[in-house]
Every structure is written in structure tokens, then in C-alpha cells.
Image (cartoon, rainbow, N blue to C red):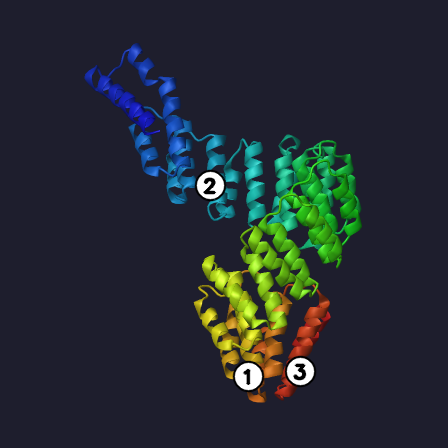
């Protein structure tokens, strides 16, 4: 690449020298050299290549040395800045472009969406752009989806001319509904998009159909997912795996296994998903049988079967299979978390210490999920000092980190220490950019109610009374929120604390 760059640099230098030596009013022959399309194309390609390789300075050098620049040159430089996170320079290049085209606008819109998803500025440019094309709509719809503005994405999709409602736009929108976390609310919109793309003739496109299968399975409509699957003539392995995963997600293991057996080709994802389905439904024997049939096993397959034992409370088997695994392949952080959970459940301190030694050898001691599992393990084994030491080593503790150490202090009689961290935990929960699971609040309160004396319980109840009832909570199960509220009542009663009844009634009615 350096040789090409030097050759290009020499050509540009010769051209400039030629222009300097001759009359300022160039003859037709000089004009032909200046407008040498091959040189222009080569320069633009060199700029783009440097940008892809992260060589912004070299791209700038080529750009500034060019005797003549066209719109493609400016757009290439804009894209270089955007690819390397220099959004302000990208905007300067856009503003300085003499003749901005649809391609220029699309590049700048994509730059805003790629760098921090500044969808507001991207949309401003989109509205200014008079001649929009497929790329314009696809970029803007993707931007709205990334920013969580799903209704605006849907509205723009429906406003787009028919020729611009391609599978890429539809796919981005459907994936947005899947990531929205509002499954029941998104279902009508998702079905509307399905009907629309069917009328437009896009349904037979495999990538879009795969997203639709996943969407219907998330909605619990496995029958509709199966219809989309059956209509699709050209099924790839992702299509098969999507339907199997959907059935497993909805606990329809028999249906998943029928699809699995019908697959013309299976990959590791197919096997792992099916093993997950069997362990999830408690059919651990079938999972083992399938595992033994698998010709090649990676760390994720081993982790799936070990996690299956843990989830079915067969902790000794989990440790036994872990011992087998380490002879076959290297465990990953999920494996370690699973076997530490098994060790904690068995209060098997020696086994846990051996696993901790392996963690140090594999340089996984600073992996957050591993640290959280170690905190929980040592706490349940009564070694709260080591649990706290590991907690202090966590660079950015999350809610699970606080939950584990608070429970550890509470379970081992360190009530004041638990309460000291309770304030930190609640502040962290309140500052989270996503909604905390209700189980987090319930676990923190549970430690307060069970292990703290009444004076500390009063403080915990006060914190919870003031902050929990107004906090946003993710609800996956009504039982968990009711359990958390019951625990709150128990804490308040133990501490002779009066709870805000109107807030509590609101919360109970809401859930």
C-alpha cells in the first residue's frame, strides 16, 4: 500500500510542476491531464483505503495534494472521518463540499447514526434532502431503531415510496420491535409490517423472513412463525435455527426437536439450542444423549450442559462435568459462573478454591461476571472478608455486584456494612440507563429484613419506601414484584416504619 501511495504522490507532484511551469491558462492538453479521470479515481480509492485502515493523516495528505477534487473526493474524506470517529471533521467536510449530492447527504446521515446515534441531526439533514433514495430511508430508519424511536421508524417506513420499502428497511424495523422490550405493545405494529412486506413481495427474502420468525416467536405466536417458515422455499441454516430457538423460547420442546430432526444440515448453534431446550424443560437425560451424539464440542456446548445441571439443581453433576470439560477445552466466563454457583449451593469451599485457582491461571479474575460469582460464592461459604476484597477489586460494579455483597454481609451478620452499601446500591439502581429487575430490589430488601437489627431495618425500609415505589421496574413476573412489596411491608413492620399507603396501593394496582 505504501508503494502505491508513493507512486500516487509522484504523479500528483509531477502534475503540479507541469502546471506551474506553463502558462496559467492551460492548453487543452493540460486540461486533459488535470482532468485525468484515472488519477482522480485512484486518489479517491486511496483516500477510502486509508480510511478503512485507520490512516486518517495519509488520507488527508492525498486529499490536500489533489489538484482537482470532485464530489466523490469530498464524500470519501467525509466517510474517512466518520469511520474513525471524527464526526466534527466529517461535518466540516460536508459543509465545504461545493456541490452536495444525495450521496453526500447519505454519507453524513450515516455518519451521525454511526457515531453516537445523533438521530436528531441526521433527521435534520434527511428533511433538507429533496432527492431521497433507498439508502436515505434505510439509514434513517436504522437510526430511529438504534435510538429506540420505533414509532418514528415505523412512521417513516410507511411514508416511504413503495420502491424504497426494501427488505433492509423492513428488517431493521422488525429487529427494532424485537429489541424494544415491549413485546405485547409491539405485536400489532409487527404484524402490520409483516402484512405490508407481504403485499410488496418481500416475504420470500430469507434475512427478512428469519427476523419475522424471531418476531412471532417473541410474541408467543409460534404458529405464525411456522407459517412464515413453511412459505419460505430457500431456507438457510439461520432460518432453521431461528424456528428451533423460537420453540425453545416458548417451551415447545417437542416441536423444536421435530424441526431439529428435519434439518438437512446442523451446526453447533442447532445442537446447543436443542440441548438448552431439553435442560430448560428438565429433560436432562435427553440433553446428555444429544450432547454425546455431537461430533465436535466447543466451550459453549459444554457450558450449556453444565448450566443445565445447575438450573436443575444437580450441582454435583455440574462439577463432575466441569472436571471432564477442562480436559477437552478451555472454560469460558459463563462456565466459571455456573460451576461457582454449584459450589456455592453445595457450600463446597475446597472445590470453589480450586476453581478460583483456575480463574487466576486463565487471567479471568477481572471479568465482571466471574467476580460477581466469586463474591456470591465466598459469601455463601461464610468467607465475607474475601467476598468484600473481590468486590473492592471490581472496577465498575453493577447491580448484581452490590446485591451479592449486601446479601453476603447480611447473611453473615455484618448488618452495618450491608446498610452502608445499601445506599450505594440504590443510587446505582436509580442511575441505571435501563430498568432494574424487580428481583434486585427484592433481594436487597430481603437481606435487610432477615439479617439487619430493627434500627438498621428502619433505615433500609425508609430508603426503599422513598425510592422503590417511584422507581421504574422491569416486570417479567408478577410474583416477583408482589414478593418484593411483601418484603417491604415486613421490613417496615419490623422497624415500626409507616409506609406511604397511597404509593403502595398505586404500585399494587399497577402490577
Residue 253 lies, with reference to residue 45, above or below; the image says: below
Residue 314 on image: x %, y %: 69, 64
Secondary structure state at the residue bearing disc 2: helix
Question: Residues under labels 2 and 1: Cα distance?
Answer: 54 Å
Please report contact status of discs 3 and 1: CB closer than 8 Å, yes or no. Answer: no
Can residue 393 be seen by looking at this rendering?
yes
Residue labelled with disc 1 = 413
Query: In the picture shown, does residue 333 fall above or below 482?
Result: above
Is disc 2 in contact with disc 1, using a CB cutoff of under 8 Å?
no
Q: Nearer the viewer, mark 3 or mark 2?
A: 3
Q: Is residue 383 left or right of residue 487?
A: left
Rendered location of residue 111, percent (x, y): 46, 41
Q: Secondary structure at mark 3?
A: helix
Q: Nearer the viewer, residue 481 or 26?
A: 481
Taking the spot 64% from the left edge, 63% from the top edge, the residue there is 474
**Labels 3 and 2 touching (C-beta < 8 A):** no
Q: Which residue is mark 2?
A: 111
Q: Earlier in the sequence, mark 2 or mark 1?
A: 2
Residue 183, disc: none
Which percent across, then down, holds residue 198? Answer: 74, 35
Q: Nearer the viewer, residue 297 or 37?
A: 297
- Which labelled disc corresponds to residue 490? 3
Report how far apart the C-alphas of labels 3 and 1 lie in the structure. Answer: 19 Å
For numbered disc 1, what is the local secondary structure?
Answer: loop
For the N terminus, the image quarter is top left
For image coordinates 74% across by 34% down, the residue present is: 232
Residue 113, image x and y in percent? 50, 44
Q: Earlier in the sequence, mark 3 or mark 1?
A: 1
Q: Quadrant of the C terminus?
A: bottom right
Amino acid at each position: 500500500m505504501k508503494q502505491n501511495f508513493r507512486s500516487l504522490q509522484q504523479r500528483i507532484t509531477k502534475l503540479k510542476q507541469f502546471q506551474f511551469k506553463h502558462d496559467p491558462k492551460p492548453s487543452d492538453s493540460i486540461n486533459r491531464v488535470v482532468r485525468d479521470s484515472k488519477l482522480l479515481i485512484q486518489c479517491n480509492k486511496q483516500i477510502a483505503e486509508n480510511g478503512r485502515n485507520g490512516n486518517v493523516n495519509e488520507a488527508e495528505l492525498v486529499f490536500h495534494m489533489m489538484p482537482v477534487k470532485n464530489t466523490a473526493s469530498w464524500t470519501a474524506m467525509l466517510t474517512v472521518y466518520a469511520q474513525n470517529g471524527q464526526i466534527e471533521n466529517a461535518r466540516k467536510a460536508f459543509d465545504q463540499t461545493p456541490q452536495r449530492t444525495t450521496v453526500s447527504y447519505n454519507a453524513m446521515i450515516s455518519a451521525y447514526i454511526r457515531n453516537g446515534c445523533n438521530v436528531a441531526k441526521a433527521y435534520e439533514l434527511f428533511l433538507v434532502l429533496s432527492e431521497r433514495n433507498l439508502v436515505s430511508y434505510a439509514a434513517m430508519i436504522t437510526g430511529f431503531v438504534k435510538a429506540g424511536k420505533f414509532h418514528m421508524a415505523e412512521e417513516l417506513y410507511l411514508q416511504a415510496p413503495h420502491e424504497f420499502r426494501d427488505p433492509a428497511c423492513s428488517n431493521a424495523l422488525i429487529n427494532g420491535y424485537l429489541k424494544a422490550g415491549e413485546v405485547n405493545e409491539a405485536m400489532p405494529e409487527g404484524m402490520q409490517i409483516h402484512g405490508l412486506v407481504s403485499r410488496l413481495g418481500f416475504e420470500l427474502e430469507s434475512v427478512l423472513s428469519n427476523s419475522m420468525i424471531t418476531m412471532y416467536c417473541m410474541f408467543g405466536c409460534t404458529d405464525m412463525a411456522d407459517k412464515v417458515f413453511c412459505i419460505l422455499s430457500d431456507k438457510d441454516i439461520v432460518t432453521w435455527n431461528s424456528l428451533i430457538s423460537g420453540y425453545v423460547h416458548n417451551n415447545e420442546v417437542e416441536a423444536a426437536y421435530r424441526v431439529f430432526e428435519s434439518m438437512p444440515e446442523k451446526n453447533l448453534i442447532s445442537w446447543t439450542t436443542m440441548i438448552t431446550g431439553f435442560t430448560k424443560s428438565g429433560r436432562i437425560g435427553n440433553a446428555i444423549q444429544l450432547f454425546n451424539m455431537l461430533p465436535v464440542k466447543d466451550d459453549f456446548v459444554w457450558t450449556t450442559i453444565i448450566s443445565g445441571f445447575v438450573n436443575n439443581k444437580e450441582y454435583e453433576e455440574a462439577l463432575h462435568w466441569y472436571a471432564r470439560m477442562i480436559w477437552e477445552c478451555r472454560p469460558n466466563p459463563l462456565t466459571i459462573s455456573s460451576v461457582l454457583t454449584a459450589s456455592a449451593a453445595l457450600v463446597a469451599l475446597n472445590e470453589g478454591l480450586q476453581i478460583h485457582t483456575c480463574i487466576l491461571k486463565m487471567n479471568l479474575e477481572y471479568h465482571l461476571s466471574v467476580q460477581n460469582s466469586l463474591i456470591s460464592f465466598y459469601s455463601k461459604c461464610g468467607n465475607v472478608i474475601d467476598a468484600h476484597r473481590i468486590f473492592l477489586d471490581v472496577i465498575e460494579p453493577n447491580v448484581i455486584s452490590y446485591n451479592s455483597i449486601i446479601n453476603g454481609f447480611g447473611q453473615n451478620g455484618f448488618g452495618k456494612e450491608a446498610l452502608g452499601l445499601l445506599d450505594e446500591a440504590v443510587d446505582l439502581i436509580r442511575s441505571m440507563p435501563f430498568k432494574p429487575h424487580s428481583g434486585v430490589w427484592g433481594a436487597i430488601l430481603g437481606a435487610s429484613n432477615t439479617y439487619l437489627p430493627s434500627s438498621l431495618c428502619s433505615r433500609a425500609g425508609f430508603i426503599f419506601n422513598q425510592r422503590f415505589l417511584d422507581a421504574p421496574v422491569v416486570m417479567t413476573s408478577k410474583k416477583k414484584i408482589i414478593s418484593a412489596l411483601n418484603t417491604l411491608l415486613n421490613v417496615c413492620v419490623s422497624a415500626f416504619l409507616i409506609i406511604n399507603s397511597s404509593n403502595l396501593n398505586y404500585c399494587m394496582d399497577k402490577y
